[in-house]
Amino acid sequence: MKDGQFITLAIESSCDESAAAVLSDGRFVMSNIISSQIDIHEKFGGVVPEVASRHHLVDINRVIDEAISEAGIEWRDIDLIGVTNGPGLVGSLVIGVATAKALSLSLDKPIVAVNHMHGHISSNFITYPELEPPFISLVVSGGHTNIIEVNGYTDFKVLGATRDDAVGEAYDKVARVIGLGYPGGPKIDKLALKGDKSAIEFKRVYLDKDGFDFSFSGVKTGVINYVHRQKQKGNEINTADVSASFQESVVEVLVEKSVRAVKVSGLDKLVLAGGVAANSRLRQLITQRCKEEKIKLYLPAINLCTDNAAMIGVAAYYKYKSQGADDLTFDVHSRMDF
Ligand code: KG4
Ligand code: ZN
């Protein structure tokens, strides 16, 4: 406790960001430090798990020290330690989890293991201090594409999921095919602004119109085939048009399915979450459709869309409040249900 505030220290290392944050009273950020390895993995064209875990090992203590000092707290002020234990890269997760367990033991403070995806949804509780469940969340990241009915802070019901690629994964693969490099999402987002979204007709894959599942491998293959065909004909590829047309075909489906999920569930709030929530076209179209449908829309702050520890701190707090602490024997998991 510091000045009567409940202090959470959160640690996140599920992929290529070593991150630590300090929060007060659940959802108020005192510090949020992220050490990104993008520059390192860029030259490999994607995240190399072995390289990622080694860098976490080098960075994690410095990142935590910085989070503590920027928050202006002492170690003894910490009331709770939260750490991501999945889903993610196992070699990366173990660095954060081992560090968090060591701190819990040495400081004699409770610890909770956090599902990374609960963290992504929780980023909105920071951006909107008044936001409370229930609501529908569209979760779009590098590994997940889900429509979730959030009935409480720790109560998640999966309404829909991708049957193949996650949307972020499709962005990254398409970016590679048109030579943009890693991470592809932000690069396609930027280039698409200069392109014509109706230049090329890529399929909108709705699967079962009444269901909430997604499929993005078809449109990804559509882009690959288009690029090959143009190359065979000796045509130059307009990467801006490809970016804009691909993006439109996935964003339209994401928006329509989530708007319908809000209507079918009888709820009135839609909450966006995950790395792809930073996408400017997705934010634009979902804002427009929610306005038309009179749905209250919540968009996470851009800096909280991609991986960070502040969102993990929020999810840790609510899990601790409802279920108490975990014991030190919890494991890490590459895959995890909601
Ligand atoms: O949530 P996140 O940081 O990590 C996972 O939990 O997966 O999401 C990373 C994903 C990557 O696929 C990245 O290309 C995508 O989010 N992304 C974007 C944008 N910013 C990040 N995709 C589209 N537009 C963006 N602006
Ligand atoms: Zn993530």
Image: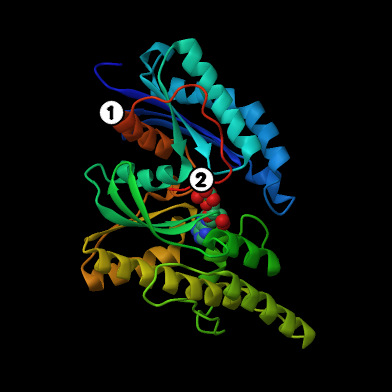
In the picture provided, is 94 more to the left or to the right than 208?
right
Residue with the mark numbered 2: 336
Depth check, front residue: 298 or 207: 207
In the picture provided, is 288 more to the left or to the right than 167?
left
Q: Give the spatial CA distance, label 1 vs label 2.
A: 27 Å
Residue with the mark numbered 1: 25
In the picture provided, is 140 more to the left or to the right than 257?
right
Residue at image coords 72%, 81% = 236
Callout 2: SS = loop
Residue 206, numbered circle = none
* Pointer 2 local density, CA inside 10 Å: few below 14, some 14–19, many at least 20: few
Q: Where is residue 140 in the image (x, y as percent from the top left)?
A: 46, 57
Q: Where is residue 9 in the image (x, y as percent from the top left)?
A: 42, 25
Check the image and tell me how it is coloured.
rainbow
Q: Do the residues labelled 1 and 2 touch (CB within 8 Å)?
A: no
Depth check, front residue: 85 or 92: 85
Q: Where is residue 297 in the image (x, y as percent from the top left)?
A: 28, 59
